[in-house]
Image: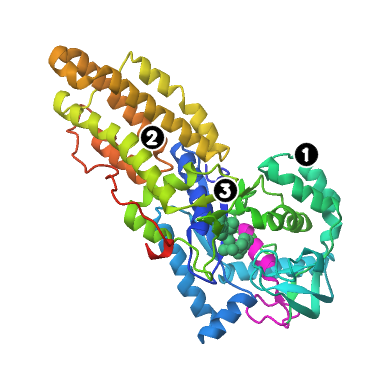
Amino acid sequence: MMNTKKYYITTPLYYVNDKPHIGHAYTTLAADVLARHLRAKDIPVHFQTGTDEHGSNIEKIAREKGIAPKVWCDGISADFRNLWKTLNIKYDYFIRTTDAAHEAGVQAVFEQLIKSGDIYPGSYEGLYCSSCEAFYDEGELKEKNCPVHARPVERVKEETYFFRLSKYGDALLAHYEKHPDFLSPRYRSQELINFVKSGLRDISVSRTKVAWGVPVRSDPKHTVYVWFDALLNYATGAGYNPEHNSPDFPVLWPADVHLVGKEIFRFHGVIWPAMLMALGVELPRKVYAHGWWTINGDKMSKSRGNYIRAEDVVRDYGVDALRYFIFREVPFGQDGDFSMEAFHRRYNADLANDLGNLFSRLMNMAAKYLDHRLPEKPADSEIFRELTSWTPEIHRRIEALQFSEALEKIWQGVSTLNRLVDTKKPWALAKTDPAALKSFLHEMVWCLRLLAAWLDPFMPDTASRMHLQLGVGRTAGGVEPQKVPPLFPRKQEEKTGDPKNN
Ligand code: MSP
């Protein structure tokens, strides 16, 4: 049917102040894993990501570089899209806040809320961090600096439009209560609930001193505050415009999950739903906040040179090793530390040894002893039956965004198979009992097919190489297994030192 609701997944829109790093890749990869998993189950998915391009920070950077802000944005926005390609991320729609349809949607929303009285004019004095694009109270600062960037804030005093956030506190609390998974994971929700309970104040949503933004239609000396503009992407990208909705909107809306980092949970869990309430639009089903990566124990920071480029890791280890590591190493939701030592260790242990060797040992024997033909599903295999019964749990974990738990279970399968090969000693059976060997390899081939299907959302390249060699998806009656290079060639040298010099 044309208008079946799609499962709508979003990532935040990335600032284009600098090239992307592993922290940005994290949120987008998580969306990709979930999207791939659902698509494999034939659930229609819509996955949106993009770039957040307005605001004083971008304006300043472009000025320093001596180029027009849009030209700067075009370059960095393309870097993000290229990285998503390198990382094998399959999104459905890439939105830029400089897109005409988005800007028109933002303007229409602003006018509508002026009309309804939820946006009203006033004047504001506050402390502003241009890196966060956010105002802070004196009490929130750390040693007089921005608590996130540890950089000085500026005192801003100007005429502004306010959004009547204060009006929505009770409605928000009622919504959290009625939908206990709206703010996920639960251990992060209390902080937001307390914040709302402490009383919400109206927020400034326009600037007169920032030219690089969406002009307020009825009062163009104001531009729309960059967060108010950017949050609306989730709706405008899905076709929302209060003046003329697209027929796509009900197909996509409400969003099923907004994936965000913990530092922007408040914007997504408090301000965004209040904006939607003001517009009379249904709220998203879930906002999920993940944790932060540090690098070798320190905050990841481009300006301090402490960062890892995803491209470098991919060049040295392959894209799937990166996709595996970031979801295996740390439970999604919690903070974690990225070090090339830990990465290298997992690469050799989990990928080259456990998975890679298992696969090549079995496939070499299958090629030799199964007459180059891949057999029908085994009618009576205890191990295949047992592993098949794990599939619902693995799916449940992915759908609950418990990626590390899903991978742990998958690797439990890898170990189970490795142990079985060790005890069965198929290479010895070749001499003593060729029929038993064949039937064992027959079972193993099917177990490996299952493994490849489990791995697919996390490691799509690896899964398709496994499938290719297993002859999956080709003509009935069997095909010759393809010889492929090892899935994960063992790496000898341990990478150490400054990550960016690798
Ligand atoms: N532009 C805003 C979001 C607007 S959404 C309407 C923004 N952009 S960002 O580029 O700073 O961050 C985007 C995402 O990258 C966030 O989810 C953030 O958590 C993630 N990460 C950036 N650095 C990170 C780490 N070091 N670790 C994990 N994720 C981090 O905020």
Which is more toward the observer, 452 or 143? 143
Dot placed on the residue nearer the N-terminal end, 2 or 1: 1
Dot placed on the residue nearer the N-terminal end, 2 or 3: 3
Q: Quadrant of ligand 1?
A: bottom right
Position of residue 165 measured from the top left corner of the image (x, y, whole percent): 81, 60
Position of residue 410 measured from the top left corner of the image (x, y, whole percent): 43, 32
Numbered circle sitting on residue 8 = 3
Is residue 238 in view?
no
Residue under pointer 1: 178
**Dot 2 surroundings within 10 Å: few (below 14), some, or many (20 or more)?**
many
Residue at 47% of width from left, 54% of height from top?
Answer: 91
Q: Is residue 301 above or below residue 432?
A: below
Q: Is residue 131 left or right of residue 414?
A: right
**Please, what secondary structure does the residue beneath circle 2 have?**
helix
- Residue 227 forms part of the magenta stretch: yes
Residue under pointer 2: 453
